Each structure stands twice: as C-alpha cells, then as structure tokens.
Amino acid sequence: MPDTSTGNTAKPSRRTVLAATAGVTAALAVPGPAHAHGDRRLRRLISRMTLEEKVGQLFVSRAYGHSATAPDQADIDANLREFGVRTPAELVARYRLGGVIYFAWAHNTRDPHQIAALSNGLQRASLGLPHRLPLLISTDQEHGIVARIGRPATLFPGAMAIGAGGSRTDARALGRIAGRELRAMGVRQDYTPVADVNVNPANPVIGVRSFGADPDAVARLVAAETAGYQRSGVAATAKHFPGHGDTETDSHYGFPVIRHTRAQWEALDAPPFRAAIEAGIDSIMTAHILVPALDDSGDPATLSRPILTGILREQLGFDGVVVTDALDMAGVRQKYGDDRVPVLALKAGVDQLLNAPRLDLAWNAVLEAVQDGELTEERLEESILRVLRLKAKLGLLDDPWTDEDAVDRVVGTAAHLATADRIAGRTTTLLVNEGGLLPLAPDDTPRLLVVGADPASPSGTTGPPTTVLARALTELGFTATALSTGTAPSAAVIERAVAAAGEADAVVVATYNVTATSSQRTLVERLLATGRPVVAVAVRNPYDAARLPGVRAYLATYSWTDVEVRAAARVIAGQVEPRGKLPVPVQRADDPTRVLYPLGHGLTY
C-alpha cells in the first residue's frame, strides 16, 4: 500500500528521465502456471462453504486494537463506528474474513510479543467458525520509510538504498531476515517488494520506495528480495501492477495517469514484474492508476480486465494471488461507488479485496452480485482456490499458530541488527566531495553542529534524524550537538542555526525534499556563508543535491531511519568508505533536460 508522505515536487522533463533509463535488456521469459499440490483437498473445503463464507474469504480488512478480544476503549469505539462490532475477533466472525492487515495507526503493532498474541487470537477466532479456515495476516513492511512494525524488530534500509548498494545478496538477506521476523509474529503475507521503476523524480508516492530507475536493476533486486521472503515462509507481494513509477499524482488522493506507450511499458515497467513471476512470487498488488495504452476504457488497473486478466494472467502467466491496493484510496473511488468497486475488481481478475472503506457495503455488494447473477459462485471459487493454495503453501492449514515464547529468539536479534547495519553501510552514496572535505576527523573538527530537517520519524525508529546523527557522530569521537530546523525553517530558526554554527568547527545539515522555493535552501546558503565546512545529507530524495550546488560535500541516505542515518555518520567519520551508487539519475535544477549526476554515480575515499 502506498505511503502517504509527500515527495519531491520538482518537474523534470519526462523525455529526459526516460532517456536516462534507456538500455534495458530483453524481457525475461515467463514460466507456465504452477499449481500447488492438494487442490482436491482445497476444492472439498470450498464445496462445504456457504456463499457468505466464500464472500468473506475474498476480503482482507483492517481491525482496530492490540488484542483480538480485549482492545482498548478507543479501539472498541472505532470498531463499532466502522464495522458495528466491538473487537477484531467479532469482525472476523461477522464477515468470515479471509485475512486481516496490520497497521500501526490501528494499534495492531505495539511490540513483537503483543503482535504474536494478536495473531494467535485472530486465528483462534477464525478457526472457531464453521469453515475452520485460518486467516492470512498481512502488513506493509517495506522497510525504509514504510514499516508498520518498528523497534525492537529489525529495520532495514529502504528499497532505493538497497538499489544504491546494488547487491542481490543483501536484498535476499533482507527478505530472509525480515520474513523470519514477520513469521515469528504471525504475519505471513508482506506487501513488498515495490516493483515500480521510479523514472519520475516528481513522483509523490513511490520515490525512494522503489529500487531505482533502471528496470533491469530493479528486476534483479525484486527477484532477490522475493526469494528471501518466500524462503522464510512469508508470501512476498510485488506492487503496484502494472507500474506506479512514472506518476505525478498520489493515488491516495487522486487518479494518476501513466502516459507510457505499450512499448515503453514493456521496456520500463514490465521487467520487474516479469522477474517477480519468474522468481515464483506468491502475490501481486494492483495499482489504482490509468494506463490508456494498456486499457483505454478509463478504468483504473485495479478494475481492468484487459490489464489483470489479459496481461497479468494470460500474457505474463501469473496464477498466484492478485490483491488490490487499498480500496479506500481515491484512485479507485472516483469513477465508481464503493459498492461497485469490489464487484468490478473481481470481474477484472482480482482475488483479494484489501481494506474496503465500508466493509459492510462491499461485502454485501459482492454477495448480491452473486445472488443477482452478475458474478457466479464459480468465479468466486477460482479466487478462493488461489487464496487457499497460498494458505496451504504457507502451512497455515496445518499449523496457523505462532510460538509466542520464541519471539525473542527471532525478532530483533543481535545478529539480525548487525546484518542491517552492515547492509546500510554499503548503501550510503557520496555525490559531492570537493577538495576532499570528507571524511571529517575528530582531531581536526572536534565540534560538530547537526542541523536540518526532522520529518516525522518512520514507524518504529527512534528519531529525530538530527538527534540520531548527532548521537552517532558523538559515539565516533566528535562532540556533536543537534539543532532541529525543520523542513521549512523560519527566519528566526535560520538565525539561531547560523549563530550556533559560529561555535562549531563544521556543520552537518540534513535536507529533505528541497524545492526551488524551500527555505531549506536559505538555511544552507547562510550556513555556507559562515565559512564553516558544511556537509549535507539528503535524508530522503537524492535530487536535493541539484538544488544546493554550493555544498562541497553531499551524501544521500534515501531514508531517515536510524540504520541509514547511522551509516551516514560512519561515512562522514571515515569509519567506512562510501560505496553506494546512484540508482536514479539526478537532473540539473536549472535545466531538467540535462543530467547532473547519472545513474551509477558515486564517489569514494
């Protein structure tokens, strides 16, 4: 599910960005469909289900509360308001749900032991129903800027950082370790990896959640991460089909349009999804986007039979589970009502209906569509069979339980955390280092001022990033002081930062989505005018470097999570050499038709 945070607002030339990612290889071969064993057993299960139970198996819903049966009063109120039930267990029972999705904002993910207990409580509720089928519990644990489960679970660098590292071994290790930890908490379907190719720097919703702008590089890392997750017993989910990388609209709030030709789609957007399918990915998530070259009906991909059945099923040969992106997003709600969307999605070829805004309306609409003959029970059974195949593959039909006593032996172990730090150390990218300003040494510049943007910390990290960075630099021998100046520093805040810089030997400034009119530019320019050495760290989009040409040393971390910020500190201090290479091109701010830093750019010491 896409993140809701704001991205860079720069408007580079589309032709330039597409040209910068040219040179893709031929499309990967697609294997034929491979069915799981035991279909006869699964069909017997389906034959004993009522129509209501069949409808329920298609829905994956949020549920409020940290406990299946004893949520806090505020969560009881939320469940009553949205679903007419008090607890998550009652929600599962009322709608015979096939799955539940966890969110931090729904208070599902306080800590690993609580998550494991919630998972067992939900499974107990589902197994107590007549069909006695386990739930498929899912979440969005992409790492980087989108993570629903935080510390003490292990948090890894996000996709674009992994793209900067370029290591399939690291991507596979990420999936393997993250999958093991999710499985230990009862989560068996993760909505990752992001298979979108981010060829548009102005993309407000994908951005650093993508591995990069090179389709072939993205394809390799998608396949590697998929293998890691699925070998750990967690279903990976490639998203957002047919590709959300070249949009300037966030599908949470609008209806994006992809203007690629069919040939451009084949070359730019399709390779990661082909690679995911070749790697045996268990599920693929749809995008609420319009792609006229693939379907000129005006329908979003989520509701498009030509895209989901014609291309994904028939052309690409995918016979796994197709799950919608969240149905409460604007991109899928602008053309049809909330009662029509789930029916049309099923007619298009979807198997799982994710997070309907009004579950009662959506559930009854599907039920009535079958009763009225618009949908057949056989069509529902096709999707239910795919969902049950996945549950069987994951072992849920035989053992859906989570060993709550084993959580500490798996989640956030010292070995896992050390691996995350090592991977992060291979991702930090040095874009600029004029005059060999970096690395800094405590003997030469003992007093550091760390200023800059402190965006809301990604889920489960300690934050804010200036504090994390100052602490890490202090541990490396400097005396570092943090001064948060925010993403839009006022004149008074800038004056305070400039005054503090006068007491420092060097300044480290964190930048976040710098635009042409951003007061972050004024802050950096004023700091440069002090004559103190200034090191900038782009803590989200690497495109910031184009807006601040006067900076002599510029690093990109691709996220402001602790693991990536600490890695940047080690590079600044020379404890590790920068090894990351840009996975996206950075255009000039004054002339977006020209590339300032190309794909693969990255300096070292």
Image (cartoon, grey):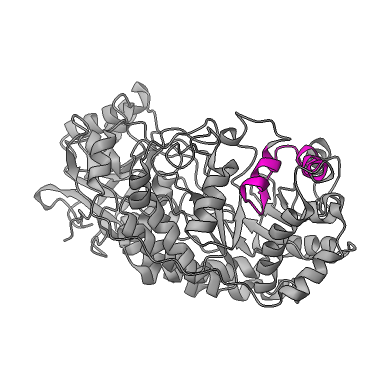
Image position of 519 with respect to 243: above or below: above
| Closer to us: 523 or 195 | 195
Image position of 146 with respect to 580: above or below: above
Residue at horizontal 39%, vertical 66%?
29
Left or right side of 30 for 373: right
Q: Quadrant of residue 303?
A: top right
Residue 387 is a magenta residue? no
Left or right side of 108 for 87: right
Residue at horizontal 34%, vertical 43%?
541
Residue stretch rendered in magenta on the structure? 341-369
Image position of 440 with respect to 247: above or below: below
Residue 583 in the image: x percent, y percent?
29, 53
Residue 355 is a magenta residue? yes
Q: Quadrant of residue 538?
A: top left
Image position of 86 with respect to 395: above or below: above
Residue at horizontal 69%, vertical 75%?
395
| Closer to us: 374 or 353 | 374
